[in-house]
């Protein structure tokens, strides 16, 4: 039986005990949440790692880091470095979005060294191999090749896969029935649409959805239903194309659950702040409470070089409204392949957003962390503050750059420190 089927039937799978311990809940509570679909536990039977996590209602908001090679930077070494940086910075999951070099070698190398759930977008590999190795075009990818790629990655141990099943002829008609500023910005979404246009056929990932589910269930891969029609700028947010795809994703969620496959839903990338809460509520309603995985959202389009900040603002609002999984954005977003430093900045920014939201959601332990920091600050306990910091290395660096102030205060206020003055010290 799959993890979902075990939960429904009350079978105490060891995965529940491991995950419950890491999440600070009881195995029984976790099983009930998985059975109802509001929590997913991404854990492929072929991928062994210690810290099994849950994503969804009642648990801490999780953060994902995207890494992966490109045609211009095809090596695996730099991606393994980014993996290490992501984990050290506190990412709960990682996605390999590689499109350059030996994709099997890169993915397997990352999987071998990945102590957290790993996700992929299988159509990337199917398209790259069709274009680069077979001298074809995007629309030449065969259905058989696409599904064999999905199966190969599942056998390798990928824990969750983003698959753009919600792009159908119907949703494409609605998208093309009105003008967007930026059209389609999802890479997987654009590949799928190009395939549909060239072949004049329905999306094979939608048409053969049951075959997809059979592969995912056999290897215990969680289904991340991709948002191929997500808005790529504020002007396109919450339009008919996005919402039509979301309606399809809700219908596919129920089919996946019925097949024993765990699901989470991917959400929009660019959105004005005043639309975020409505989008979260709409997704939860249309997709039956399934966990929601958002890219940001980015709340302005005019901050290239600082999009980890625009992402954190939107992520905090989204998570406080009920989003369960935040995909980081790095300062390099829209500009280049991120470096290891960019990755670290992105993870920390997303973790700040996630934690801020967990406080408002009343997640056990969230506010206690901040209370401990307040106590250390009030005591002018610098080591304690550094140890509690989300990024202890950065906190220690700044403390030392301030001259490692010899007194009990810092180099900002010195003897005029408000805390010291108030205490009469």
Image (spheres, rainbow, N blue to C red):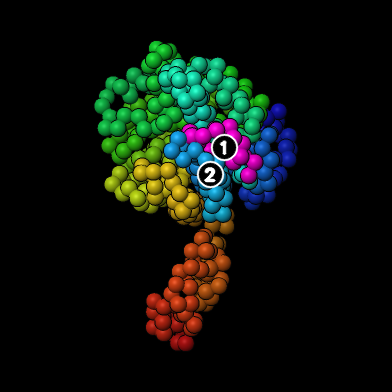
Most foreground residue, 29 or 258: 258
Give SS at disc 1: helix
Residue located at (50% from left, 42% from top) = 67
The answer to which quarter of the image holds residue 37 is top right
Residue located at (42% from left, 43% from top) = 337
Residue located at (36% from left, 21% from top) = 172
Q: Which badge, 1 or 2, comes first in the chain's sequence?
A: 2
Q: Which residue is mark 2?
A: 79
**In the rendered image of this protein, does residue 188 appear above or below residue 201?**
below
Most foreground residue, 224 or 90: 90
The quadrant of the rendering that contains the N terminus is top right
**In the rendered image of this protein, does residue 68 appear above or below residue 219?**
below
Give SS at disc 2: helix
Magenta residues, start to end: 94-113
Task: Please say whether residue 104 is one of the residues in the magenta stretch.
Answer: yes
Q: What number of labels is visible?
A: 2
* Disc 1 residue crowd, few under 14, some 14–19, many 20+, Cα 10 Å: many
Most foreground residue, 357 or 404: 404
Residue 74 percent location from the top left of the image: 49, 38
Residue located at (34% from left, 36% from top) = 232
Residue 258 percent location from the top left of the image: 60, 24
* Badge number at residue 106: 1
**In the rendered image of this protein, does residue 262 appear above or below residue 322?**
above
- CB atoms of marks 1 and 2 within 8 Å: yes
């Amino acid at each position: 039986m799959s993890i979902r089927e075990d939960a429904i039937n009350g079978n105490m799978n060891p995965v529940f005990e491991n995950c419950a311990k890491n999440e600070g809940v009881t195995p029984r509570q976790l099983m009930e949440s998985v059975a109802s679909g509001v929590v997913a536990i991404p854990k492929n039977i072929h991928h062994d790692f210690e810290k099994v996590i849950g994503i969804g209602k009642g648990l801490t908001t999780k953060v994902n880091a995207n890494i992966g090679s490109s045609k211009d930077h095809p090596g695996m070494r730099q991606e393994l470095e980014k993996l290490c940086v992501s984990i050290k910075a506190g990412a709960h999951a990682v996605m390999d979005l590689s499109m350059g070099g030996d994709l099997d070698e890169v993915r397997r190398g990352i999987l071998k060294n990945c102590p957290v759930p790993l996700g992929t977008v299988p159509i990337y590999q199917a398209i790259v191999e069709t274009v680069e190795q077979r001298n074809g075009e995007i629309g030449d990818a065969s259905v058989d090749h696409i599904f064999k790629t999905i199966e190969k990655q599942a056998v390798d141990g990928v824990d969750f896969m983003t698959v753009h099943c919600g792009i159908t002829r119907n949703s494409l008609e609605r998208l093309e029935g009105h003008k967007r500023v930026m059209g389609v910005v999802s890479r997987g979404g654009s590949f799928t649409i190009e395939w549909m246009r060239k072949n004049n056929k329905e999306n094979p990932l939608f048409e053969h959805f049951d075959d997809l589910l059979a592969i995912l269930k056999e290897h215990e891969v969680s289904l991340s239903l991709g948002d191929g029609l997500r808005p790529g700028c504020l002007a396109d947010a919450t339009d008919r194309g996005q919402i039509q795809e979301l309606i399809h994703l809700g219908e596919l969620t129920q089919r996946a659950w019925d097949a024993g496959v765990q699901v989470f839903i991917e959400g929009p990338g660019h959105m004005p702040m005043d639309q975020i809460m409505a989008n979260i509520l709409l997704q939860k309603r249309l997709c039956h409470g399934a966990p929601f995985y958002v890219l940001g959202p980015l709340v302005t389009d005019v901050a290239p070089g600082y999009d980890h900040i625009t992402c954190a603002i939107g992520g905090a609002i989204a998570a406080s409204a009920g989003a369960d999984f935040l995909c980081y954005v790095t300062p390099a977003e829209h500009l280049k392949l991120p470096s290891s430093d960019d990755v670290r900045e992105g993870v920390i920014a997303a973790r700040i957003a996630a934690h801020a939201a967990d406080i408002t959601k009343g997640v056990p332990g969230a506010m206690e962390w901040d209370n401990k920091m307040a106590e250390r600050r009030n005591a002018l306990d610098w080591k304690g503050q550094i140890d509690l910091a989300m990024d202890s290395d950065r906190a220690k660096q700044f403390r030392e750059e301030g001259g490692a102030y010899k007194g009990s205060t810092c180099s900002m206020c010195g003897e005029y420190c408000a805390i010291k003055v108030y205490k009469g010290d």
